[in-house]
Image (cartoon, grey):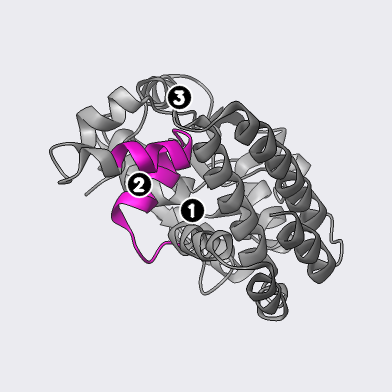
Amino acid sequence: MKGLLGSKLKRDIQRFMEGDTHAALLIGPEVNQLSESIEAQLKITNNILITKLSPEKSSITIDQVRELKRSLSLRQHEYSNRVLLIESSESMTNEAQNSLLKILEEPPRGLRFFILASSKQHIIQTILSRVLVLHIGKISLEEALDYYESLLPSIDQIKKMHSIADGAPGKLFSLLNDESAEYTDAINEAKKILAESVFDRLTRIDTLSKNKPMAIDVCNALEDILRAVSHAPSTSNSSVKMLTQKRKIVAGAQKSLLMNVNTKLVLVDVFLAL
């Protein structure tokens, strides 16, 4: 099953493929979960060759980019257009990004770049200044039901997961389809944390603080769940105020973790506030 792309995003991709800009950066949470759907959308334009660049283990290395340069130098006469689809670009080392920059500045004839990133935080400014920045946007509940209803047995489950994902297509696809996805793991962990006593939550901190990316994902998942509950029709006004305050604390924790504040101290504050 492929993930759903919003109609606006499809139009943005089509305009990019038909325009003069040779590089685009698509930003959005869990965007890499939609890689297959994005590739299919890129291929709507006839006679397109897709070349992928993905992380080996945890990052995209300079050796990968060097090998890419060699492969791109081979002439492929049967294709009038080529697209380099770069997945998880935020995982690229600085050396790899600087090497990629040279291809961006002087791309081979007929080559376009379509770069996926969950955020632009780790993308160097010189690359950002040379790309068209696109945002993945949200999909409506109606779009989600229309697309997933024939693929999944439970309409209530689609509605629930759409609320948690807040319409983010990559998050929604992860929740509905991929039980091994990192976001799905984070949501499951967040659910356990919310159901536990304060003492049990605090016992998790030592383990979670040793995995900072997971700690950030869990905080993100906690915020998503709290938002979904606050938007539920059955939630009282007083509860909405309490949940909103908790969301602010969790959102602040995410920012602190990204700024390299002590992970354990941040988690203590969050888990006590919940």
Whether 202 is drawn above or below 65: the answer is below
Horizontal relation, residue 196 to residue 252: left or right: left
Q: Bounds of the magenta span?
A: 158-181
Between disc 2 and disc 1, the foreground one is 2
Residue in front for this viewpoint, 42 or 244: 244
Horizontal relation, residue 45 to residue 53: left or right: left
Residue sitting at 37 percent across and 27 percent down?
6
Residue sitting at 62 percent across and 68 percent down?
197
Q: Which residue is mark 1?
A: 87
Q: Which residue is mark 3?
A: 16
Say which mark, if any, is on residue 173. 2
**2 or 3: tag closer to the N-terminus:** 3
Residue in front for this viewpoint, 60 or 192: 192
- The image quarter in which residue 170 lies: top left
Horizontal relation, residue 58 to residue 51: left or right: right
Residue 38 visible to the viewer: no
Classified by dominant secondary structure, the portion drawn in magenta counts as helix
How far separated are the C-alphas under marks 2 and 3? 24 Å
Residue type for callout 3: Phe
Whether 264 is drawn above or below 137: the answer is below
- Residue 106 lies in magenta, yes or no? no
**Secondary element at tag 2:** helix
**Residue 15 % position (x, y):** 42, 19
State yes or no: discs 2 and 3 in contact (Cβ < 8 Å).
Answer: no
Whether 199 is drawn above or below 110: the answer is below
